[in-house]
Image (cartoon, rainbow, N blue to C red):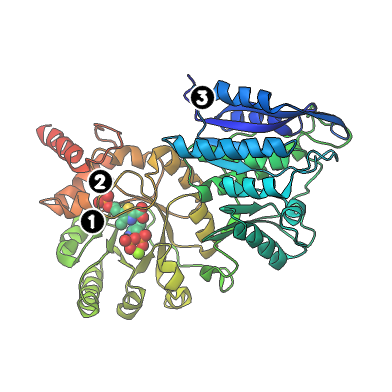
Amino acid sequence: MSEEPVAWVIGGIDTSGGAGITRDAITLADISVHACVLTTQVANQSHSTMRSASALSIETLNAQWQALEIELPPKAIKIGAIANTAQALFLCEHVTKIKQYKSTSCFVVWDPVLVSSSGGVLSELSQQSVDALIAAVDIVTPNVKELSQLSGWPVHCEKSLLAAAKVLIARGAKAVYVKGGHAHWQSTAIDTFVSTHAVRIFQQPRDNMGNLRGTGCMFASALAGFVASDYDIQDALTLANAYLHKVRNASLLSTNSVCSADHIHCAELVGFPLTPVHYPSVRFGESDPIRRQTPMHFPRLTDTSLGVYPVLNDISQLEALVEAGAVIIQLRIKFGTQDDKSLQIAKAVEMVKNTPCQLFINDDWELAIKHGAYGVHLGQEDLETANLHAISRAGLRLGISTHGYCELQRIKWLNPSYIALGHIFPTTTKDMPSKPQGLDRLSRYVRLCGDTPTVAIGGINLARINPVASTGVSGIAVVRAITQAKDPAAAYHNLRQQMSGGEVISDVIDDDTDKVSTSVQHGLNHE
Ligand SMILES: Cc1ncc(COP(=O)(O)OP(=O)(O)O)c(N)n1
Ligand SMILES: Cc1nc(C(=O)O)sc1CCOP(=O)(O)O
Ligand SMILES: [Mg+2]
């Protein structure tokens, strides 16, 4: 059996290979996802014309479904062209069932291909079957024209686009992602995600779009593939958007594409998007609070070789760690009155005065300004309420938490002093709504941050610190590994030593960080 996650693609065969399930399978292979293909119809077409299309029977569609269901269950399904109402109702019923009885969840994308990119009408579905399908799947990915057809509303500007997407939500859609590639009113390429509780706007420079076929298929199959690879929906959308941008760039640059005929391009294989240039900038809704004003810049860090970054619950361990040589320390006081916090922050600022230690205050940005701290650390939720201009005007540095591609691409707008990347391993210090990222993702995030210093956080201890350091992060933040140590300064010293090449016992992701840490500590003591 394949080690790769499995995604099913259900749709038409485009005989030219430019779009349809052939293109879906190529896209999934390009991002290391195993594709199972179920055919709804055969569309006899070249890149420029469609001659005819013949639908497969429900029996044949069902036979394909049954052949796969037990042995190759999908983590995600991408549905493309559906030939007729009977097929739409079949898919509705089976998607609903597979989502109900599967122990692992199955994410379903419907790319509502109503007209082929070579100009042919691919399907006419009854309103009832369209509505049922919209409500059965997890996300619908129309372009502007398809959104207008599905919603029955004219779409001619951002406002009407949002209104039409909300019409689909009101009809039972869980989420809609509108591809703005051909939206004539946009000067940049803007894709809009609308769900029952969130709006995300993805923006790319408008490249010369060329005549690349199958981009809708590629986006939706890449989205299914990234969800099958365990990315959450907003990260999968960010990655699929970046993947498409990379495909477009590569395909238009290519001069020897064998598919290039009459200026119609076939997509190049490009693999996982790794470089910042392919990634969209992201806004959390039309009125994202961090976009209230022009792009901001926070002061650079004085020393960017951060090393071990102790995150302390109060000031009791601060002096010892400053003396141990910590280049950066965070005061993260979660309990107590404002008066008590104010007192501790004032004392902390005094304690690091005339030392090289860069002191960050977590959350309490007003107290940090009041007492003249070096910097402030804020999470995504804190950004909704903090006065970023006040922090910037006061000359404080800003560190920001992120937990994946989407948040990372959102906060780049602020040009923070450092970007925190978490949580890398399981942690018991706080409840995390997201999954642990692991080392491979961490390496990729570090690359995406470019010149901005990075900090890894979450479940890092003596056993794990060396592989974390190998990813190239500028700093490694720890809470328990220092605050729960008998001798915090010695723990800091050991972590720093291990970071630069000591023995590594294990790189397992488990929830037993303290045990691993203790066993390595003993190992070092015996040396
Ligand atoms: C270095 C570093 N990274 C992440 C965090 C977490 O910040 P936030 O998401 O605001 O959560 P709280 O710390 O406030 O619980 C951090 N504090 N430091
Ligand atoms: C405070 C915090 N923020 C995280 C994030 O991912 O944003 S993880 C985390 C807890 C880190 O604690 P420990 O080193 O004890 O695992
Ligand atoms: Mg916070």
Residue at image mark 2? 496
Residue 243 can be seen, yes or no: no
Give percent across and percent down for residue 349. Answer: 25, 72
Residue 467: mark in rendering:
none
Badge 1: how crowded within 10 Å, few (<14), some, or many (20+)? Answer: some
In the image: residue 309, left or right of residue 439? left
On the rendered structure, is 238 left or right of 460? right
| 161 is higher (above) or lower (below) than 393 | above
Looking at the picture, how far across and down is residue 238, in whole percent?
57, 49
Helix, strand or loop at label 2? It is helix
Q: Which residue is mark 1?
A: 325
For numbered disc 3, what is the local secondary structure?
Answer: loop
Residue for badge 3 = 72
Q: Residue at x 50, y 39 (%)?
A: 99
Contact (CB < 8 A) between labels 2 and 1? yes
Q: Nearer the viewer, residue 354 or 312?
A: 312
Q: Earlier in the sequence, mark 2 or mark 1?
A: 1
**Crowd tier of the residue under label 2, counting other residues whose Cα lies within 10 Å: few below 14, some 14–19, many 20 or above:** many
Look at 32% across and 43% down and name the residue there: 425
- Which mark is in front, 2 or 1? 2
**Residue that appears at 80% across and 44% down:** 210
User: Residue type at mark 1?
Assistant: Gly
Q: Residues within 10 Å of mark 3 (few under 14, many from 20)?
A: some
Does the closest atom of ligand 2 sit within 8 Å of the Cβ of label 2? no
Asked if labels 3 and 1 touch by Cβ distance under 8 angstroms, the answer is no
* Disc 1 element: loop
Q: Residue at x 42, y 58 (%)?
A: 418
Q: Is 373 positioned to the left or the right of 129 in the image?
A: left
Residue 432 in the figure: left or right of residue 194: left
